[in-house]
Amino acid sequence: MPSARLRPLGLLLFVTLASNLTGACASATATRPNVLIFLTDDQGWGDLSIHGNTNLATPHIDSIARDGALFDRFYVSPVCSPTRAEFLTGRYHPRGGVYGTSAKAERLNLDEKTVAQTFKASGYATAAFGKWHSGSQNPYHPNARGFDEYYGVLSGHWPNYFDTLMDHNGQSVRGKGFIADDLTDHAIAFIEQKRNQPFFVYLPFNTPHAPMQVPGRFYDKFANAPISMRNRDPEKEDVPFTRAALAMVENVDWNVGRVLERLEKLGLAQETMVLFFSDNGPNSWRWNGDMKGRKGSIDEGGIRSPFMIRWPGQIRPGTRVPQIAAAIDLLPTLADLAGIPITSDKPLDGKSVKPLLMGNKDPWPDRQLFAFRGKHQVSVRTQQYRLDGDGALFDIVADPGQRTDVSAQHPDIATQLRAAAAQMDRDVLAKHGQDDRPLPVGHTALTALPAGDGTTDGTVARSNKAPNSSYFMNWSRTTDSVTWDIEVAQAGNYEVMIEYACPAADLGAMLELTFGSQRISTKVTEAHDPPLLGAEHDRTPRTESFYKDWKPMSLGTIRLEASRGPLVLRATEIPGKQAAEIASITLIRR
């Protein structure tokens, strides 16, 4: 039975306001709506059957649009962390200090207020289950950004999707089964627990981002299947990769269906807003509606995302929204729909699209939406035109594939949009690459510093060019070092745990950690030489790092004063070929 959670309005006032509505609308309006947001990782606009792709079937995702609204032109960023920042804040990602996806550039500035903080301030139970990718150490951690409950992975390029390590409210735990299924299980459990109060649930799946891993029950359908709909440049398409990606999307669809079904069984469907979108274009050359570009591009194909939203009784089923919109619009729109105030004290770039969802017939003014890539790459989208990152102009309505530059035919429009792009470059990208934010330590009793957040000096190498989820290897010289730029929030004695691997032949290295005048050291005396893992689940060759089951070892206890400085790890003695392979260090305040 639907719950009867009333808004903080007098009952008489509510009845008066509702008197002109249908019974269904009145029922939905009587409750403060729940919010459920699905975000997929590297799923293109074309990876849905509702958009015409016959290579796969996505009935549950499609049903959100069928039962609510489908946006024809919805835009995100070309890569994942920037899109997440824009969704969380309603502001263009560079304003919040997010310029990339690793090496600390993915962190959302601490003075930014998130959509979760907005809903939490209005009494919502808030939770996130999945890929965070907006900063790992507290206070960047999701528990410090408005989410009461968090379960998932904190960074990108996660190396394994089966029984993988997860973060649960700041503690490392072992997941169960395939990651998307596991995240969905936790989301369903939270919804059941909070069904009698308003909840805000964010479910950002890691998939179909590589590595291309998916259970056999989904992959078997595609393993040898013909791919009839191909990329517009079919010679670029890696068909085995496409098959794996489509299988992963069908797994996402199955999990979306599981949550929707549970909402129905709990009697919550009528009072829950459900949203679905992706964080960027497809992660390979596959069918994407003849659009130019893919993930990493600020052309149409790199940043156009599926977006659909349903709210029974409020949003008319089958609504189509032709006006352009973007991830920056989600925070103001959700707050507007829920009738709650926004907590951010910064000006938003997004605007509420509630009038478009509710069938308001008032004229909707044209607008400019911007996308950024690198220091000076800015693309501009209006309702009819796209200015690409090189300054070429396309009539995207007449030429959705961006094949003909019409700058000469429309010089005034080209000049106007180039000026707008240049202004945004000056205003928004002025500090691109100027990141002087240290890694915070000591805000909680335990602070993990993964290899991805450190910098190397000498011949020490990463296991992968993508820092996320990599580890340090090739540590063969005593002049080499690894440094984490940290700022200690609370002085104290900190035990230092290190995750390492070292074969028996290389035992005996002396590891030394320093911070200011303080130093501790210990010898590596226990062999641990596990195999590389990950390939056993891969459906196609990976670009991400493989991983290992690391062994923890205490380096001892070091005194850290409340100050900023380099935390430096060295190997002062290396009797074998290498000191050790290092995955992370963890500082535990004692």
Image: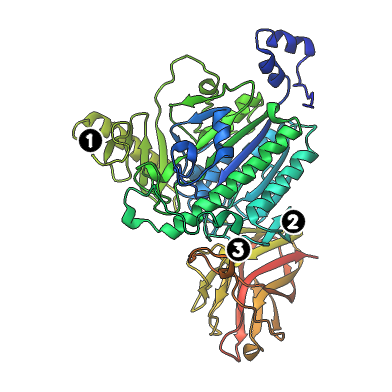
Label 1 or label 2, whichever lies nearer to me, is 1
Identify the mark at residue 160; answer none if there is no mark: 3
Q: Name which residue type carries label 1.
A: Val
Element on which disc 3 rests: loop
Position of residue 577 measured from the top left corner of the image (x, y, whole percent):
56, 89
Q: Is there CB contact under 8 Å for labels 2 and 3?
A: no
Q: Earlier in the sequence, mark 2 or mark 3?
A: 3
Question: How many angstroms separate mark 1 from mark 3 (CA)?
Answer: 46 Å
Identify the mark at residue 444; answer none if there is no mark: 2
Q: Does residue 359 sit above or below 201 in this rendering?
A: above
Residue receiving disc 1:
406
Identify the mark at residue 578; answer none if there is no mark: none
Question: How many angstroms separate mark 2 from mark 3 (CA)?
Answer: 27 Å
Q: Earlier in the sequence, mark 1 or mark 3?
A: 3
Q: Name which residue type carries label 2.
A: Thr
Q: Would residue 333 be visible to someone looking at this image? A: yes
Q: Earlier in the sequence, mark 1 or mark 2?
A: 1
Q: Name which residue type carries label 3.
A: Asn
Q: Residues within 10 Å of mark 3 (few under 14, many from 20)?
A: many
Q: Residues within 10 Å of mark 1 (few under 14, many from 20)?
A: some
Q: Judge left or right: residue 384 versus residue 198.
A: left
Q: Judge left or right: residue 515 versus residue 283.
A: right
Position of residue 489 measured from the top left corner of the image (x, y, whole percent):
70, 57
Q: Judge left or right: residue 315 versus residue 399.
A: right
Question: How many angstroms separate mark 1 from mark 2 (CA)?
Answer: 56 Å
Which quadrant is home to the C terminus? bottom right
Position of residue 347 measured from the top left corner of the image (x, y, whole percent):
53, 32
Label 1 or label 3, whichever lies nearer to me, is 3
Position of residue 574 measured from the top left corner of the image (x, y, whole percent):
60, 88
